[in-house]
Image (tube, rainbow, N blue to C red):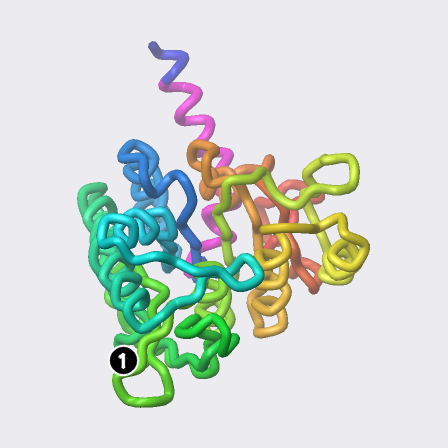
Amino acid sequence: MNRDWTATARTLSEALPYLQRYSGAVVVVKFGGNAMGDDDAMAEFARDIVLMKQVGMNPVVCHGGGPMINELLAKLGIESTFVRGKRVTTKETVEVVEMVLSGLVNKRIVQAINDAGGRAVGISGKDDDLMVCEADDPELGFVGRPVEMNVQIIRDLYKAGMIPVIAPVATGMADNETFNVNGDTAAGAIAGALRADRLLLLTDVAGVKDKNGQVLTQLHPDQVRAMIADGTIAGGMIPKTETALKALEDGVRAVVILDGRVPNASLLELFTEHGAGSLIRSTPPSTRPRGLRQGEASL
């Protein structure tokens, strides 16, 4: 038993340079995928977020909820149609989307964080006109693309010691207009508007892979664009990497695409030398602060 305690103490000590590095940092975390439907995984994610806040970071959670939306639409007998693989979101459908995302999913995450000892507040892109959208594609109906971001409400919350949990539902330019926004897109827009230190996109895959199927741990945006062009990055990874590129252009320091199924994935990425997933950044790290190991990248 003493050996276990010693290992715990050593782990905390080794984490010191990383804790110093991220003190005061704004980290936007996109939470979604299979972990959202698993109570244990939800509780573990919530503990990770609370720990981030406890050690001086400012975590901001943005979530999805596709499987839950599908489930309720099926129960209500509302059929979905698709254009080029994307769901057409009618006025009837967007009402269900808002109910699920702003209600069920958002409050479930808020409750999990509060149960873990945090102080979470759930909002959506409609609150204080946080996210104003226009139609991304007229054929898709009420699927939105953010065109105006007002993130002061997020800053007010984390400066007050709260953890913002944001549902990707937005207002439109017209009165009483509601848009469903892709969770990754929303997280990227929020991170960009906040000029966040990190955007963590938790997914159901290990990261960005090369032609041989090996996960690439660090990438420059030019490499990402080349891999999209030659087909190495394909399928569902394309919108995630495009979100990463847009976030970097908007001022986010670095984006990490990582496997949210891995226990404590966010903590592995932020607080260990090992890291997790694929880090994409366009600028070299800043000067190495005291305490970091030789070769370790700073923010």
Where residue 103 appears, as percent x and y from the top left, is 21, 58
Q: Name the residue under label 1.
A: 128
Q: Choose top left, top right, bottom left or bottom right for residue 240.
A: bottom right
Q: Residue furthest bottom?
A: 174
- Residue 142 in sight here: yes
In percent of the image, x 37 and y 88: which residue is there?
A: 173
Total residue callouts:
1
Region of the chain picked out in magenta, as a range? 5-24
- Element under label 1? helix
Nearest to the observer: residue 175 or residue 214: 175
Which of the image's four quarters has the N terminus? top left
Main SS of residues in magenta? helix
In percent of the image, x 81 and y 54: which residue is there?
A: 230
- Residue 155 in sight here: no
Task: Say whether residue 293 is magenta.
Answer: no
Nearest to the observer: residue 144 or residue 63: 144
Where residue 14 appears, as percent x and y from the top left, is 51, 34
- Judged left or right of residue 262, residue 229 is right
Task: Say whether residue 10 is magenta.
Answer: yes
Question: Which amino acid, by three-letter code, is at mark 1?
Answer: Asp
